[in-house]
Amino acid sequence: MPPKPPRRAGHAAAKSQRASPDCGSAPLPAPRLDIGEADFVGLCDALKVPEGVREKAWKTYEGLSAADGALASNKKKKETWGVCIFIVAIDLDEITFTFTELLKSIGMNVCTFFQFLKEVDVNMDTVSTKVDSTVSRLKKKYDVLLALYHKFERTCGLIYLEQPSSEISAELNSVLVLKNYWITFLLAKGKVLQVEDDLVISFQLLLCVLDYFIKLSPPAMLKEPYKSAVTAVAVNGSARTPRRGQNRSTRTSKQVDTDTKVIEILCKEHDCNLDEVKNVYSTSFIPFLNSIGIVASSGLPEVEVILQQYEELYLKNKDIDARLFLDHDETLQPDVMARSQVDRMPLKPNSDEEHILTLPQTPVRAAMNNIQQLSMILNSAADKPSDTLIKYFNNCTVNPKDSILKRVENFDHIFKKKFAEAVGQGCAEIGAQRYKLGVRLYYRVMESMLKSEEERLSVQNFSKLLNGNIFHTSLLACAVEVVMATYGSNASQSDGTSAETDLSFPWILNVFDLKAFDFYKVIESFIRVEPSLTREMKKHLERCEHRIMESLAWQSGSPLFDLIKQSKEREGQTEQPEPTSTLNLPLQHNHTAADLYLSPVRSPKKKGPPLSGTSTSDAQPGVTPQTQKPQKSTSLSLFYKKVYLLAYLRLHTLFFRLLSDHPDLEPLIWTLFQHTLQNEYELMRDRHLDQIMMCSMYGICKVKNVDLRFKTIVSAYKELPNANQETFKRVLIREEQYDSIIVFYNSVFMQKLKMNILQYASNRPPTLSPIPHIPRSPYQFSNSPRRVPAGNNIYISPLKSPYKFSDGFQSPTKMTPRSRILVSIGESFGTSEKFQKINQMVCNSDYHLKRSAEVSAAPKPLKRLRFDIEGQDEADGSKHLPQESKFQQKLAEMTSTRTRMQKQKLNDGNDTSASEEK
């Protein structure tokens, strides 16, 4: 075998050595191509990069350096080589190195690498969607590992003594213990979980590892209360008795049944559900111990055995070597901002302290709090329909009880199977637990919905609604999605891409075999009738709704296209899904899930028995009698209103970043955008709303001779919070053919809308579409004031309790300096200072809220307490509505008078000060 060329040698030296073999009769290898500089060749050799990857990586590097000369500088050259090798190796499925090996070879930190990869993709075509998906998976795994290691390190500091007594063997020092624990956990996590970015199950598994090792540790090494717990177990003879003669499976099974004191302490300290952790222990951790053959006869498992098995797993996965966390290796250290967030732990409130310092929560603590809050809501809920629901079922023309129970049971089996396939076969029971919580929430929300419908319509027979399969499937899926999202809290912010096994939305739609458009119908009503949902869950469901409106509802096979077709046929081609004349009207409606699932059966203005009728719904568009015109679809009308609003908000955000110097172009771009959604809706089939938005912007700028390149549009779009790389890198061109967005514009969008776009350059441009009215979010979040019904201009806010969350109330970290002085009727105030502060806030113009949603207009001062909606912006606040009560008018007048008096007093004080200075 000819010797490899030295790294410092150039091309000539490499040629010479390959041309003059001196290895006797050894077979000659395939001739190596002369690719790149010597250091590039050396880097490839170190990573064992195959020839095909080398050649393409070098070409990629040459293309990048030609586009950006800074990447070819000595300072960034090696990093750029590493990124190019990484990209090409993934694209060609020829990865011969681990991600950590690559980082070590080019001397980069994991966070720096991710950021640099983003910067390298200057032309948006260097990094494929395949690479994006791999990077997304690596990011999620790294963020979860980082959060877990910080939690692990702190927890071990609370368990073990830093300097144990001299009777403890020197081999059992804290460094060895930490190393043994952590590597065992990494091995368990890798073998048990297929979805390694599941923060909650990973943390529960970590607690199982801690429990196992604590019981095997000498009590003299432990702090309280773990020392007492282990001592008590030893006295009972359960954990410290000789074990050589016991079968390992029998021993570990006995431990989880009898030695629960330690795991109880761990769960209590971390606000973790004890039953769930026990379930993970018995169904996942014990089988893991049995599978790897850990020998515990010497007290603690051998580090070398665990190390060898983890090494094999790490080399197989070719990703992150998480053992380096133990050494605080720079390769895996977070950047400064991320470190500051992780390092700041929430402080437990001291009862003696009046003021509680507000600190951000760590990812693990935040996840545990979200789960605990959901558990508090559902612990008192039943697994079966309540007596109230049974009464509603009995009032139906056809009793739906049996079909409802059968449906819930069938989906139990389906969900359990799908969950196990995605997460790991040993996690099937974990999936069953989560589904059970979802069923409880399903029945709870169903009861609230029916009560609300009864109050609204004065009817009790909901036979048509309650016998609808799609309604129940959607409601159950939504309830389970809330549970999954609560447990699926990740340590990082999603960037829109996800791995195939990701349990996040829209995974639930595939499990329940549900169309996204049908799922959308239940979201708003679900949020409105379930006030106990956290702000995070309301936001999550709102994001799900946006995902549906931007792409999921427009997939082939969606009932949306049938409804649009019906709408067009209703009155000929002049009929529109939603007239443009309504765009500038507020998005206010009284429609509920019942209206949407039974639409187009009845109008919300009508009251009475239609809920129990047998007319055709949206889900059955083809059964409409030919003698009767198709009725207008409520669900389609509301859907289009929301789509228009979402579309304009995104367009305005992007426009503000790119074309703020050309305000006259925004209505033109919006008109083309809205026209496409309304009249050329087939362009949305299997595509994305943002693709049409970017094409509309580029088309108008092109025809108006405004210099705006597609590359610039995409660069700005990438920075939007809702952006996804695949949106502009992989656009449907024709059946099963995908390309970049610029190819889509030239070959599809422009061809379809060329005549329409050219009209904007003529003397008679199309009539401009009205700008949609920009409301606040239709969903009332927990910290937003809610208006008292019956027309009173009185607003209430939920009480923010100063108590610990673990006591059954919200965490004190939710309180702010201003919210801490809010009062509630019936509360003991102690002094009148709080009232004085409130009076000052009401009268002081410095306390105002910005209209954050109204991004199209300059922010207006907004009084904290609004007594008169229409007259709130008057100069003196004295304008009144005819419908106002005398009390309300008097109250407004008093507020106005008080304001003028304070202003006068302030002016008098200023005058006095001025005269004294003279």
Image: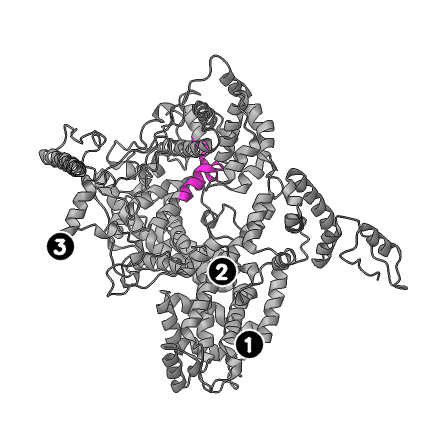
Magenta-drawn segment: 543-563
Q: Are dots 1 and 3 in contact, CB under 8 Å?
A: no
On screen, residue 395 above or below 760:
below
Amino acid of disc 3: Thr
Q: Residue 608 lies in what quarter of the image?
A: top left
Q: Earlier in the sequence, mark 3 or mark 2?
A: 2
The numbered mark at residue 294 is 1
Q: Nearer the viewer, residue 899 or 680?
A: 899
Image depth: mark 1 or mark 3 in front: 3
Q: Residue 808 lies in what quarter of the image?
A: bottom left
Q: Nearer the viewer, residue 480 or 18?
A: 18
Marks 1 and 2, Cα distance to the nearest angstrom? 26 Å
The picture places residue 84, in percent across and down from the top left corner, at: 66, 48
What residue is drawn where x is 10% and y is 35%? 890
Amino acid of disc 2: Leu
On screen, residue 250 above or below 913:
below
- Determine whether the residue tagged by mark 2 lies in a helix, strand or loop: helix
555 inside magenta stretch: yes
Marks 1 and 3, Cα distance to the nearest angstrom? 64 Å
- Determine whether the residue tagged by mark 1 lies in a helix, strand or loop: loop
The numbered mark at residue 146 is 2
The numbered mark at residue 831 is 3
Say if residue 405 shows up in the picture.
yes
Q: Are dots 1 and 2 in contact, CB under 8 Å?
A: no
